[in-house]
Amino acid sequence: MKFSKLSQLFLVSAFGLILATLLTACQLVSIDIVYVADSAGSSTGSAGQIQTFAVDAGSGALRSAGPIVSSGGTTPVSLAVTTDSANLYVANQGNKTVVHFAIAASGTVSQKDTVTLATVPVSIAVNAAGTYLYVISGTTSATLTEYALSSGTIGSAISTVSLVVPGYATDTILPTGVAVLPSNAAVYVTAVDKSAYNPGGATTSNANPGWLFGFSLGSSGALNATSGSPYQSGVKPSALAIDPTSRFVYATDYASNDLVGYTVQSNNSLNFMVNGPFKTGDEPTAITIDPRGLYIYIANSLDNTVSSYSISLPTGTPSTVVNATSSAGNATDTQPVSIVVEPALGRYVYTANYLGNSVSGFKLNPNTGALESNQATPYPTSAIPTAIVAIPHGNHALQTTTP
């Protein structure tokens, strides 16, 4: 049987079209870059490093997206990125440093400058304007330091405040979390009384309260305590998150397995949310809010789960989200200690699992907030991952939802 030249041309074109379609279907489209801070194969946490992963748009699966680079120190514990996705910062406890990395368009990072602290850093945050870096530090006392940023470069310390609780002046206060209002107007810090803390994680029966400190940003970056600060915050507050509208602040209580909510007042002071606190899983360690401000996700380090909540937009009150199938969709690998929602589409949630040496991934239902485990999760990392952040890769808009 012979084909005419026209028929042959048609077959070749059709075959080429089919092949191109198949190749396109197999191609991964990256919507986000995820950074994980961990340590290079040492259970004691030396040789800090940063791993770079790309998020597949269709499945949420992670794949390596660049070389592993040194964190610029040892025992990295916290990561922060600027809202323009141009700068990454890492806090290293082992050598008391905060290191700045520039982020290329491809997502790769390169070390730029370093600041060395007098005390051990615990957590860091950057304001939305990209003008200030906030560092909480201390193992025998608690300090909040504000550094000026210029095109990402860490400048001089603008303001340093000691976190002291009136009436508890002789107690040792330890910082645990820091977050900045998206409006850039204030910064908040959680801290625990050492009586509520010991290396085993247990809480003593006579533990003093935990605390949340608030500071409004004054002229030239001055930090001024908000009215009523510090505020009681459970027994052992462990992490902080603020909604995108700067109206609500949430703190996790590691000791009581609670979520404590606050409403932000016009002077940046805080009021407790009614009907709170709200129950979490066992030993909540990290918290994040999706970029639309509709849902809260909490990593529970003891029972290896993620708690999901929807936010009442008028009041900020969280309500537990129940998965349509089972709670198995919220299970992580062992001991999740950091959590993030990817910012490009707001469709995937990731936890860094300290003892699992991995990242767990979940697909977020944008209409309900329910979670479903991602394809091929968990994703292996190097030893003892402690922090995770994400930036959008390319031009992607958030998907619309029905609250």
Image (cartoon, rainbow, N blue to C red):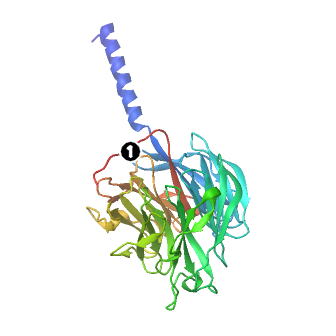
In which quadrant of the rendered view does residue 84 lie?
Answer: top right
Residue 301 seen: no
Q: Is residue 399 above or below residue 305?
A: above
For image coordinates 70% across by 67% down, the residue present is: 94
Q: Is residue 397 above or below residue 165?
A: above
Report whether 145 appears left or right of 85: right
Q: Tell me the crowding category of disc 1: few under 14, some 14 to 19, or many 20 or more residues within 10 angstroms, Cα based.
A: few
Residue 115 seen: yes
Q: Is residue 207 above or below residue 120?
A: below
On the image, the x and y values in percent for residue 257 come to 42, 77
Residue on which disc 1 sits: 58
Q: Amino acid at mark 1?
A: Gly
For image coordinates 61% across by 78% down, the residue present is: 164
Report whether 355 appears left or right of 109: left
Name the quadrant of the N terminus: top left
In which quadrant of the rendered view does residue 99 lie?
Answer: bottom right
In which quadrant of the rendered view does residue 373 lie?
Answer: bottom left
On the image, the x and y values in percent for residue 348 come to 41, 53
Number of marks in the image? 1
Residue situated furthest top in the rendering: 5
On the image, the x and y values in percent for residue 142 come to 63, 74
On the image, the x and y values in percent for residue 103 come to 61, 45
For image coordinates 30% across by 8% down, the residue present is: 4
Q: Secondary structure at mark 1?
A: loop
Name the quadrant of the C terminus: bottom left
Residue situated furthest bottom in the rendering: 206
Q: Is residue 253 above or below residue 81?
A: below
Report whether 312 appears left or right of 132: left
